[in-house]
Amino acid sequence: MKIVFSTSGDGLDAPLDSRFGRAPKFLAYDLETDSFEVIDNLQNLQAAQGAGVQAASTVARLGAGAVVTGHCGPKAFRVLSTAGIKVYPCDAPTVAAALELYRAGKLAEARNADVEGHWA
Amino acid sequence: MMLAIASGKGGTGKTTLAVNLARVFDAELQLLDCDVEEPNAHLFLAGEPGEETVVTVPIPEVDERLCDGCGECGRICRYNAIVTAGAAPLVFPELCHGCGGCAHVCPQKAIREVPKRIGVVETFRSGNIALVHGRLDIGVAMAPPLVRAVKARRRNDAPAIIDAPPGTSCPVIAAIRGAGAVVLVTEPTPFGLHDLTLAVDLVRELRIPFGVVVNRAGIGDDRVHAFCAREQIPLLAEIPDDRRIAEAYARGKLIVEALPEYRALFQDLCGKIERLEREDPE
């Protein structure tokens, strides 16, 4: 299964970004092969609106089964849950630390968005 | 004549200027209050209410029996208002600008457009002034379609003054587009100057002749004047920082009625604006 982390860097030691829709990058980690790829989110970083919607759809296209991020708003959450992707809010400092917590089963799945939308 | 009154900064006196200009205009005139997030011209005109019309925007509705989840609708939408994440697309009506692109590109013809209410257009009559304003519903963030609905009430047989929203974003562009001249109201302060320069860039981009009115003249500094001189922008009028004007405003009174000595200032300004529009080289 692929698990996607919001991040501002290019590797496992990079910080976990607390934003989802406007995170600079996503790191998609493949738990089967222990490999990862980094996807740029620059387009959404500058979007006037709907960054969370578009980021969630990017994650869905990657075929991910879970997202680990700082916070997730209502529209992104609705897209992710429709796509069957689980959301794990996490305040770990790095992607590696968040991955460890996930593997240890120490992250709780979000049942709802944990922050308000920015638009309406 | 179709004159728009705008400003970069909010609270500089757009409505004050609009309602007083409208009142000293010596004939039938339309006042189009396009500040649909907080229309307030009616507060100063004490007009008789006329009709109220509901304004809607078309938003997509997906027939899930016809949709095959191809995702074309999401790819055409630049506002991220429709996205395919599972079988059928999700619609976010509050992000939708109502362009109809998704319904147009859907290969399965699974999308039809349904109206979503965004606000109302209301009319009032006060003496020589036919006031039209838009009132956006609470929670709605999509002002431009309502601004356009207000402007669609423009009659060709009478001059019109448009009271634009503050700022320099889409609702302002929707309000001033098509105007024959724009008056930018500012105050002579660093904030006023900063936002004035943004508004100047905007009206130059739209190629509309414009001039500046300095409100609350006497406060702040002389940098707005220096900027206008340097940029060869006509300074059309200065409204002094007179406490009595603020008092009249606070009571919902027109300056030209509470303080008749200011009538000449607004009448003179009226003439200058008409010349600005007439002398437009384009």
Image: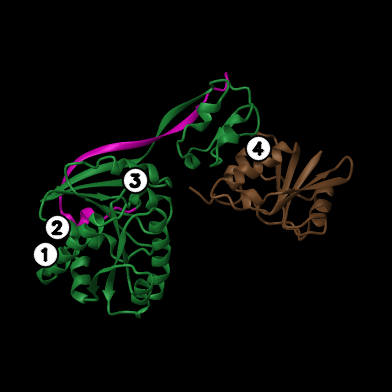
Chain colours: A brown, B green
Q: Is residue B58 magenta?
A: yes
Do residues under tags 3 and 2 come within 8 Å of each other at their CB atoms?
no
Residue B74 at x, y = what percent? 59, 34
Q: Which chain letter matches label 3?
A: B
Q: Residue furthest front?
A: B281
Identify which residue is drawn at 29% across, 40% down: B152
Q: Name the residue carrying label 1.
A: B257
Q: Is residue A62 above or below residue B230?
A: above
Q: Position of residue B186 (x, y in %)?
A: 33, 68
- Dot 1: element: helix
Chain holding disc 2: B
Q: Is residue A71 visible?
A: yes
Q: Amino acid at mark 2?
A: Arg
Disc 1 versus disc 3: distance between alpha carbons? 29 Å
Q: CA distance from mark 4 to mark 2?
A: 57 Å
* Labels 4, 3: front one: 3
**Mark 2, secondary structure of its residue:** helix
The residue closer to the viewer here, A46 or A29, is A46
**Which residue lies under the disc numbered 2?**
B23
Residue in the foreground of this view, choosing between B123 and A105: B123
Disc on the earlier residue, 1 or 2 = 2
Q: Label 4 belongs to which residue?
A: A81
Q: Nearer the viewer, residue B265 or A54?
A: B265
Quarter assignment of residue B53: top left
Q: Is residue B246 above or below residue B183?
A: below
| Residue B87 shown left or right of residue B37 in the figure | right
Between A54 and B222, the residue placed more toward the observer is: B222
Callouts 4 and 1 on one subunit: no
Identify the magenta region: B38-66
Whether residue B252 is visible, yes or no, is: no
Label 2 near label 1: C-beta < 8 Å?
yes
Q: Which residue is mark 3?
A: B147
